[in-house]
Image (tube, grey):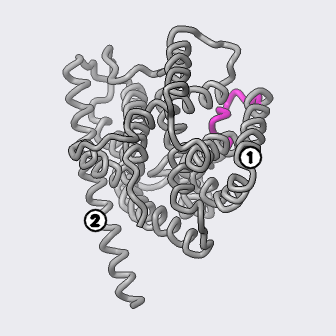
Amino acid sequence: MKERILYFDVIKVLAVICVFVSHFARTLEYYQISYSFKILPDNIFSVYTGTVGCVLFFIVSGAALMYMYQERLNLKSYFLKRLKGIYPMFWIAFIIFFALRFYIEKGYDKSIPIWRMVFSFTGFDGLAGFYCPTFYTVGEWFLGILVILYILFPILRKLTNDFPYATLAVSTLIGLIVDYTYDNPYISVTIIPIVWIPAFVFGMVFIKNIKNVGTYLLVISMVVLALFTVFDFGFCQTMTRIYIVGTALFFILVHLFKNTKGNIIRSVSGFVSKYCYPIFLVHHRMMFIFMARFSGHQFSVGDVVCLFVFMILVSLAASYFIDRMTNSVLRIWRSGNA
């Protein structure tokens, strides 16, 4: 059993916070709720706050998988573990919230072909929804991308073990080429799965070859983030900024938390990290359900803070419920197959 890495948990928690706060602000706007106070700025280091969360999550996902499977990888057990880690909880959350949505909206959209339920079954409905109507209910577009990265991991692991820096360089070059040639005003380049491979591979290379963040890397990373905070690098395309900012922020967070020994922060990060996935699944739908009541209202600073805290609490409660239900279903399934 490998030792639990604290900075993995911390980075996952920060990633979920960035996504949660961004969706909170966008849901306020969706329901035309006037507000003048923001929990976090819409952009951090010249990158959309939610996207900062995405790049951190993809980096740490690659790092965590490489940490677990660098020396040995049994394909059958690897894919079974990924399937059990993603889909039972996703399916349970989807069924519950699809039923709630069916009740609230008095039915489902009959214009969507029923065969597109396959996107929901596989967790790709959020991603596919940018290209055609789907039954998307829980999760987000990046769940589909994460599934693709998990599928590619055995190949990327082999390449990273044999040619770490070449694999990172080639994947980054491909990402940059897409970044600077992509031209679709309706779908963001961040929805293209291939542009996230460099972030995932960077996490893998970090675990295999870099391992630590010394003073030199720390100073460079801090300077980079300061520059992206002060200046508008308009010549940098979207993914280029994301790669640079994500890498620098990851280095700083690793340096800060790699050797942290405090029991409190370990307990808190471990607890929240356990519920990161269910929170990620349900938080946006919880916002749509509960924030609709305030449609068209004008909010003070206190109103925004109170609603934000309320959404945290109900999202945690729903996540706890989904987690417990999933564990119960898996226990029944295991006992039935014993």
CA–CA distance between discs 2 and 1? 40 Å
State the residue position of label 1: 167
Q: What secondary structure characterizes most of the magenta part? A: loop
Q: How many marks?
A: 2
Residue 119 inside the magenta-drawn segment: no
Residue 123 screen position, x and y as percent: 54, 57
Asked where in the image residue 188 lies, by quadrant, the reply is top right
Q: Quadrant of residue 35?
A: top left
Callout 2, which amino acid?
Arg
Tell which of 116 and 85 is nearer to you.
Answer: 85
In the drawing, what numbered circle is on residue 12?
none
Residue 324's label in the rendered image is: 2
Q: Position of residue 10 (x, y in %)?
A: 37, 42
- Quick one: quadrant of the C terminus? bottom left
Q: Residue at x 34, y 74 (%)?
A: 329
- Residue at the limit of the structure toward the top, as seen here: 231
Q: Nearer the viewer's eye, disc 2 or disc 1?
A: 1
For this rendering, which residue is in front, 138 or 105?
A: 138
Observer able to see residue 251: yes
